[in-house]
Amino acid sequence: MHEPTAIRLRHCAKTFADGTTALQPLDLDIGAGETVVLLGPSGCGKTTTLRIIAGLEQPDAGGEVWFGDTAVTHQPIEQRGVGMVFQNYALFPNMTVAENIAYGLRVRRTDSATRKRRVNDMLAMMHLEPFADRRVDQLSGGQRQRV
C-alpha cells in the first residue's frame, strides 16, 4: 500500500551570495513512515537539504517545500514542527542543562514562569530531568544531542 507523501521538495536549490552552489535543483518525495538516508561526499548538499526542510535555510526562488498538502516554504521555523540534531553541539559548557534549554527563551524575553514550565516540559520529553542541574560538559555525547 502506498503511503501518503509526508515531505515533498520541488525544484529546491541553494546558491549562496558568494556564488557557491550548495544544492543543485532537487525534487524529493518522502512517504509517511518512510526512512530515508542521504548519502554523498562532503559538500554535495545533504546538510543544506535538511536545513531547507527544517526552515533554517530558504531554497532559491522557485523552490517549494511541502509537508503533506501544506506549503511550508515560507512558514516560520517555529511553526514547522521540525527539529534538527547537529553533529557538533552548540551548547554553553559553563551552563547547566536547564540553563542551556532556557537560553533561547530568555533571549526572547519569555516570562520566568512560562520559561520554567517549558524547560521542565523539554527535560521530561527528552528524559533529561535527572541532569537538569548538571553542566553539559559532564554529559555523554548522546545526552548532549538531546539537550
Image (tube, rainbow, N blue to C red):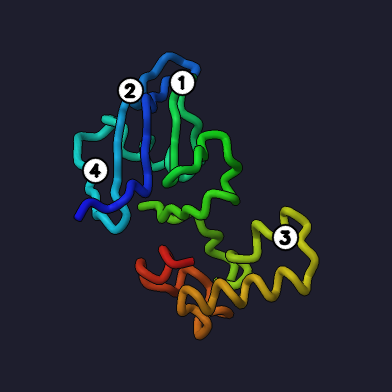
Question: Mark 4 to mark 1: distance in Å?
Answer: 23 Å
| Number of other residues with Cα within 10 Å of mark 2, as a class: few under 14, some 14 to 19, many 20 or more | some
In what element is the residue under mark 2?
strand
State the SS at label 3. helix
Disc 4 to disc 3, C-alpha distance: 35 Å
Depicted 125 relative to depicted 69: above or below: below
Of the pair 69 and 87, the residue shown nearer to us: 69
Q: What type is the residue that disc 3 sits on?
A: Arg
Dot 1 crowding, Cα within 10 Å, few <14, some 14–19, many 20+: few
User: Which of the two labelled residues, at mark 2 and mark 3, occupies the earlier sequence position?
Assistant: 2
Give percent across and percent down for residue 73: 51, 35
The residue shown at (29%, 45%) is 30
Residue identified by numbered label 1:
62
Distance, label 2 to label 3, CA atoms, is 38 Å
* 40 relative position to 134: left or right: left
The label number, if any, that marks residue 106 in the structure image? 3
Report the quarter where the N terminus lies: bottom left
Q: Amino acid at mark 2?
A: Pro
- At a point 32% along the width and 50% down the height, the residue shown is 4
Residue positioned most to the front: 1
| Labels 1 and 2: the sequence-earlier one | 2
